[in-house]
Image (tube, helix red, strand yellow):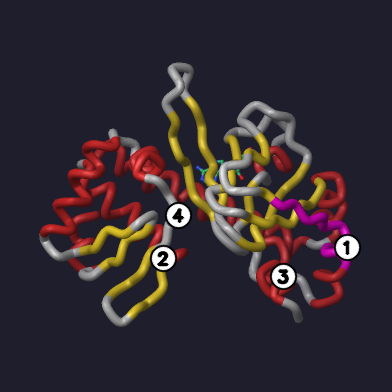
Amino acid sequence: MDETNEVLRKAPLFEALDEEGAAALRASVSEVRLGRGQTLFSEGDEGDRLYVILSGKVKLTRAAVDGRENLLSVLGPSEMFGELSLFDPRPRTASAIAVTDAVMAGLGHDDLRPFIAQQPQVSLQLLKALASRLRRTNDVMSDLVFTDVPGRVAGQLLDLADRFGKEGEDGLHVHHDLTQEELAQLVGASRETVNKALAEFALRGWLRIEAKAVVLLDVERMRRRAR
Ligand code: CMP
């Protein structure tokens, strides 16, 4: 199995399928390549495809009328997006923009619908992915209401660490690939306030700040701060 297949097989859509089913679905996949900063689709566009990330990272963002941006999520390999307009055929609910060079597997909604109807286990996997997204969204919403900015910074870094973290000798390396501005958009606060929280964590020895990355040195303290 080549690397692309391996990444694809871990995606919610493919997880429940046997080899034969996965091969049938793979036949409808077309690859899409994006350069860093390139937009795949914009909020409000009509959507007819779902995507699974094969390599790189993609951010999902929404913009306010005054131009401010809210970063809903940053997704990496095997993660899926663009499924909302499959289940509920209405315009895209967010824009998808590559934060690094990225390759995606695109699947047309029209190709997927009959497949889902024939394979109930695929629907269950997709529902599971949607449920876990709703859980995460609820957590983010509660944090926006109940948690201060440093707590939210700690929470978002731990969430990024869960998906992109790699254990190193000196700590947990989280290469998130986000600018300071994007990190602030993810936390839902100004860049200044987020930077202040990061500097405070660094001063306490809980993390080290690197270019588009952090190294978490004391995960337990970060967890307690995120609560
Ligand atoms: P769709 O509306 O087709 O296009 C934008 C996609 O962004 C959407 O499908 C979801 O896949 C994804 N998306 C929307 N809201 C969130 C969220 N809160 N967290 C993660 N992904 C989201």
> Could you tell me which quadrant the N terminus lies in?
bottom right
Q: In the image, which residues are magenta?
A: 24-33
Q: Is mark 1 within 8 Å of ligand 1?
A: no
51 relative position to 147: left or right: right
**Residue appearing at x 85%, y 59% in the figure:** 118
Say which amino acid is labelled 3: Thr
Camera-side residue of 217 and 80? 217
| Disc 1 and disc 3 in contact, CB within 8 angstroms | no
Crowding near the residue tagged with mark 4, few <14, some 14–19, many ≥20 C-alpha atoms within 10 Å: some
**Residue appearing at x 35%, y 78% in the figure:** 168
Provide the residue designation for mark 4: 177
Provide the residue designation for mark 1: 27
Crowding near the residue tagged with mark 2, few <14, some 14–19, many ≥20 C-alpha atoms within 10 Å: few
Q: Residue 92, located in which quarter of the rendered image?
A: top right
Residue located farthest toward the left when viewing the structure as drawn: 204
Give x and y (percent) for residue 143: 30, 43
| Disc 3 and disc 4 in contact, CB within 8 angstroms | no
Tell me the CA gap for discs 4 and 2. Answer: 15 Å
| Disc 4 and disc 2 in contact, CB within 8 angstroms | no
Mark 1 vs 3, N-terminal side: 3
Q: Is 31 part of what is drawn in magenta?
A: yes
Tell me the CA gap for discs 3 and 4. Answer: 22 Å
